[in-house]
Every structure is written in C-alpha cells, then in structure tokens.
Amino acid sequence: MGKSKFSIVISEEVFNIYFKDFYMNFNFDMDLYLVSKDISISNNYPNIHYFSNFNSIIELDLERDTIYFLCLNDLDFINNTNLKNNPHLILIKSENLEDKGWIQEKIHHMNDLINISNESNRDFIESLLLFNIYDIIQLNYNEFSNLEYKEIISSITKILTYISKNRILKSNTLNKEIKSILIFLKNNQEYNLEFKENNVLLYTDDYLIDDLASENIKIDFLDLKDGILNIDGYLKSNFYYDSLDFEAILESKDKNNKKIYKAKFLEYPLTDRRTYKYFGIQWLFYYNFNIRLVLDEIEDYKIILKTIFKVSDHQILIKNNISFRKHANLSHYTNYTCIDSKILEFRNNTFFIRNYSTKNMLKLEFKSLLKIIKSKKPFWYKAIFMRILYLILKPFYKNKKIFLFEDRPLQADDNGEILFKYAISQKDNIGKYFIIDKNTADYKRLSNDYNNIISFKSLKHKILYLFADKHFSSHIDRVFLDPFNDESPEFYNSLIKFRRYFIQHGVIQSDLSHWIRRYYHNLDLFLTSSSYERDSIINGYYHYDKDIVQLLGLPRYDFLENKNNLNKDILFMPTWRKYLNTKEEFLNSDYYKRLNRFFNNEKLKDYLLRYGYKIVFKPHYNISQYLNYLDIDDEYVRLAEESYRELFNSSSLLITDYSSVFFDFAYLKKPIIYYHEKDEYHFNKGYFDYDTMGFGEVIQDEDKLVDLIILYMENDCKMDEKYKKRVDNFFEYNDKNNSKRVYNWSLKEK
C-alpha cells in the first residue's frame, strides 16, 4: 500500500474532548504527533510525540502510518512553512465549511483513515470517522447539484458501513438525533412504521427512531382573554411534518356541550424550534401550535389535548403527556392559576376550568406550597414566603390598579421613562411605578422628582410585580424585567397576570423573529412607528395577532426636537460586531483598525478644525470596555457623556453603520451618513433597504466618507430634500402625541 494522505486539524477544546473519550484505545501500531503551543495538553498522554518547537516539524517526513494533530490556532504559522506543501498532508479548516471542495477533501480524508486501519486501531479510527462525519452533518447541501448530492450521500453511506452500529450508539459526543440519522443512512435509508392502538413507532431495521406516544407536549403559555383561551406549545418528533395534527377537546361539566378545536401550526425558522436537516435530509421536526378555544362564561369545562397521526388510511389519536416550559403560567409545582373570574387547573394530564371560589383556590394553593417545599429546588424557601405574603396582601390589592414602567435595570431615559412621566400626569386613580436599580444615577435623578421610583429586585418590586395589571417596558428580555428570573421563576408564574406591553427600544429594521418570538414573550402590545415596520412583524415569523402589533409611535420621540442653535457636533455611533468575543479578536479585527484610522484621519482633522466642528463619539456598550485601546485624538474627537436624547437634539450630523439610532436622528430631519465599509450586518435582513429607503448616503470608502463630511460641513449640515421625503413617507406620526396614544390604547385594552 502506498503512502496515504492524512492529518487532522483540531482546536484545543476538541482535543480535550477527543482524547478524554478515546485515550484508552491508543493500543495500536501507529505514531501520533501533537503540535501545540500548550505543552500541558500532552503531559497526561505519554504515548503522543509532542513538538513545542515548530521548526522541528517543518522538514518532518509524513510516513504512512502517522497521524498528526495540529491545533487550529497554529494554522497561520503552518501556512507560512513548506509543511503546507507536503503532498501527504491534508489541512482541514473549519472556516471552509461552505466550500464544495472541502467536503470532497473530507471524504477522501476519511477513506484514507479507513485504508490505514487494522484490528489494533479500529476503535480509534471509527471514533475519528465519527468526529469527521459530525463536521459535515449540518452543511448546506442545497448548493450541490442532485448528482453531486447523491454521490456525497453514497460516499458517506459507504464510510458508515465501516463504522459499527455499536460504536455509533456508544458515542458520547453524538446526540440521539444524530445517532438515529447515521443508523438510518447505514441502513440505506430504509424505515418502517408500526401501528398500535394509541401509538405509532418509527424504525430503521430494528432500531427505534421515534416512539410518538413517549414524546411530551410542552406548553409555552395559556392565555385567557375576553372569553378566548389560547394554548401555545410544541411537540418535537422525527415523524414527517405533514403527518401530525393536534386538537383540543372542550367538554362541559354536564357533558352536553362538546367541541373540538383544531391547532394552527406556527413556523419559527430562525429559532431553535425549526425543522432540522442532517445531510440535507429533514429529520427533526418541531410542531409549534396554537389552539384558540371559545369559552362560555358560565360553564365549567375540561380540556384534553390530543395528537393525531395520519398517513394514507391510518389515523391514530394519541394523548401525549403534557409538561410546561420554564416561563409558562403553570408548572409541575403550581398547577393552577386564577384568571379573571376563573380557576384554570391542570391535573391527570387534563385542563379544568371552573368559576373562581376562595375555598377552591386555597386548597390548590396549599397543594402547591407542599410541592414547592418537597422540591428543595434553589430558592424554594423564598417562594414559600412570597406566595404566603401574596395571599395575605391579596385583599388589600384587590381593587387597586397597578401599572409598572421600565427601561433597563441600570439605565432609564428610554421609552419606559418617557411614558411613565406622561402617565404620572394623568389623574386616573392608577398606581404607577418606575423600576430601576437603586445604585444608578438615574434612580437618584428620578427619585428627586417622583416618590414612586422602585428599586429593581427589591421586596416592593416583587410585590408590585405579582399584583400589577400592566407592565410597560422598552426592553423585552426577562433578565431586565423579572425580579424572580434568577430565583426559580416557575414557582411564581401562576401568580402573574399582567399584560405585557413592549414599547420598544427603537425602530425595528431587521428580522428579529429569532428573538421577539411569541412562544417565549407572549406580548399583549408590540409597539411600532411605521407601517413598514408593522407589516414586517405581522407578515413575518413573530406570530403576534394584528391587534397586538399597534402603530402608535415611540414615546421618546415626543421629546426629540432640534435646538435653535445646533452644536457643531458630528455624532459618530458605530454598532458592535457580534463575531468579536474577546479582547484579542477585537484588537486584531478590521473593525478596530477602521475605528483608529477614522479617529486619526489627517484630512478630516484639518477640515474639522477649519470649520469648527468636532467628532462626538458615543461608543456602543461593548466598545466601552476597549476604549483604552483606541487611539483617539481629543483635539477633534470627544467622548460623549450626554444622554442619547440630548445628543440627537444637539448634534448636526450622524455617522453610523447599522445602528437603529439613525431612525431617531432621521425623525428630526437631520443628515445621516451610513458608513458600510464592508457587509458586516450580523442580524437577519429585514424590510429596510439602505439604498432605496435610507435617510442618507451609503459610503463604503473612508476617503469618500471624509469628502462627504467636508461637503456637509461646508453646507451647514442640511438634510437633502430627497431624504426628507423619505422620512415623511416612513414615519406615521410626527405630532409629539405618541405617549398619549400608547397610554390611551392601554386604557382601552382590557
């Protein structure tokens, strides 16, 4: 047998996982070489030859039965040596995952590993093959032609014939779904169904892929409003998407009234609840559903959820077990909630709805307290205290209306604060409270003017949170809002009844359905400022009803106004880059280098001094930690200390890239420059197109950027009429009544 081309490029993280799993299989006739900067990695592996001096491997002769483990972070060095030109070495780089040629090299590499295998090293080689296969499972196979795809699947199937079924099943690095798809391919994609009275089983040969009755239906939330009960949840399975349906059977207590409600399926393609493809094959399906049931006010009901399997002439009804997600308003510990004049209870895998009575509520609460005590989960004792305190205080809060307002825990001055100030001015006998951390400057500032400023996570905050009717927030993540978020929130969710009003942090330009998805947030108001924005949400994958997505305008825009004499400030507000996770990545990035070039552009500096302007740099929160590494000339660049609103009102020109702050600036009809040196937009593209809808020029070259800034300075920073028309076309309101509209809408909403 001639020389074989093989080598493996891995990261240190993968190395640690790899050898911890397979070190005991190193009893074979093969040389192993590890190349790494970190000598500690090989201290525990005496059978591995180790090179700390890279020069010693440059002239290394790669013999047939030798495997070299090269750390991924050393590739830059290796690429500068003649090692990379060795005909017996294949360097496999993870950044080339989308390259068609890469997968062919990967397949050749795996075949080379099979060629050098023998009885003594077979376990190890099988493990290496699984590791290599794992790399290519979720590639985008749509880029291949049908012929290319069939050849790839055929090659992978042949490689899998070498790997034993037992090796696949025993792997600690593969999850259940990947194991099942590998065995399915190993069996030439053959499968069969086994039908039972209340179940369906999916097999490939004798391997069970899925047992439908064993899958849980997980409930996201139950929402009773105006006589309509919404049940949102999901079930995941390997059964094909069109083969399942769900229904809710609503039956009155006297059994004279029985209705069946079919589910509506909801797609969330940008979330982890999407359809998963392995090797281009649809394999794992998330059945996200919503069921809307119409309830009679005077009736008591029971509700049973059923899964329906249907294929050709078979239709089987299955009653899957039901469980609840972390933020659902029922849980294993608190299996009841009181909504309006009803008690909603879950027992024996069935929902029961009946009229409220204090006696029944106390019975259910006592059982819940016992379950919480027995759980011994973290913070169980706090939950017992808070739930008992809730019962004691409930009569005193019964006839009180409470509205909570919030921005971030550590920062106000956004839509939450502005709407709160408007609400406080309205005399309507509603208790209104603003939530913020007491150790912030904004807490001190607001406390000077208002009595009802509440410290985030304080006991008062927790009590108000449990008794609130409505919650207005400019941010949506629970870490910013829920005082129980870190204290086992499933102990409290059944007590929380308020309507969730998301009054936005800014205008949405991207597709944010991966984040503001219905199944997690269940909003009662999704505020928008433009018909373009509203339509993108209604027609996208957010799945909020039309009456929830309201076009009312952002409250903070009521306080945006051009000063009579604008400062000669050019506001510079670049957004962050999500791919920069460490200081080293930041300092080595083009992004960092661009910032420094801009801050030290001599031509720009000369003209700024000539016309009396300054660059005002308002760094993104994530940039702030690296300010000391930026070379900022404070003669013509200053760091902004003012609030965003003050900066928008006083500045003459805005330069940004993708930050949505440009909507605020455009609202004032002041000029904007979009500096997109290269496409680094890290969100999913939405409806907004910078070239056809943008409120300023899109510039990709720094020299052209400087020339345009100079041109604006020479013309007193006036927005072109073309862009003013775009502003008028985009925003629905410019009347400074946004706060009024939002607040009045909330009063009308029950």
Image (cartoon, grey):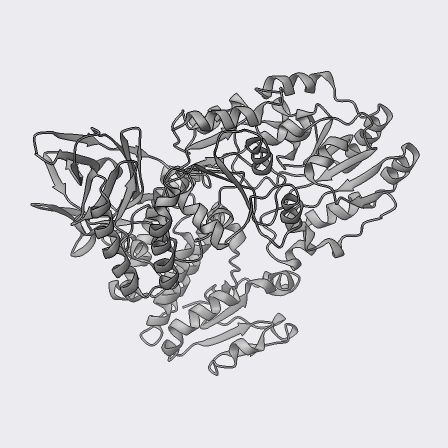
Instruction: Indicate the quadrant where residue 377 lies.
Output: bottom left
Q: Position of residue 98 (x, y in %)?
A: 49, 46
Position of the C terminus by quadrant: top left
The correct choice, above or below, for 421 with respect to 358 in the image is above
| Residue 344 visible here | yes
| Residue 7 visible here | no
Q: Is residue 732 left or right of residue 654?
A: left
In depth, the one of 549 and 656 nearer the eye is 549
Q: What residue do we see at 22% from left, 50% from top?
A: 215
Q: What residue do we see at 44% from left, 57% from top?
A: 486
In depth, the one of 487 and 325 nearer the eye is 487
Q: What residue do we see at 36% from left, 76% from top?
A: 25
Q: Position of residue 313 (x, y in %)?
A: 10, 34
Q: Position of residue 297 (x, y in %)?
A: 22, 29
Name the outermost residue toward the bottom.
46
In depth, the one of 223 and 48 nearer the eye is 223
Instruction: Indicate the quadrant where residue 694 lies.
Output: top right
Q: Is residue 612 left or right of residue 678?
A: right
* Count of numbered circles in the view: 0
Q: What residue do we see at 25% from left, 66% from top?
A: 166
Q: Position of residue 307 (x, y in %)?
A: 18, 40
Name the outermost residue toward the right.
610
Position of the N terminus by quadrant: bottom left
The correct choice, above or below, for 188 with respect to 293 in the image is below
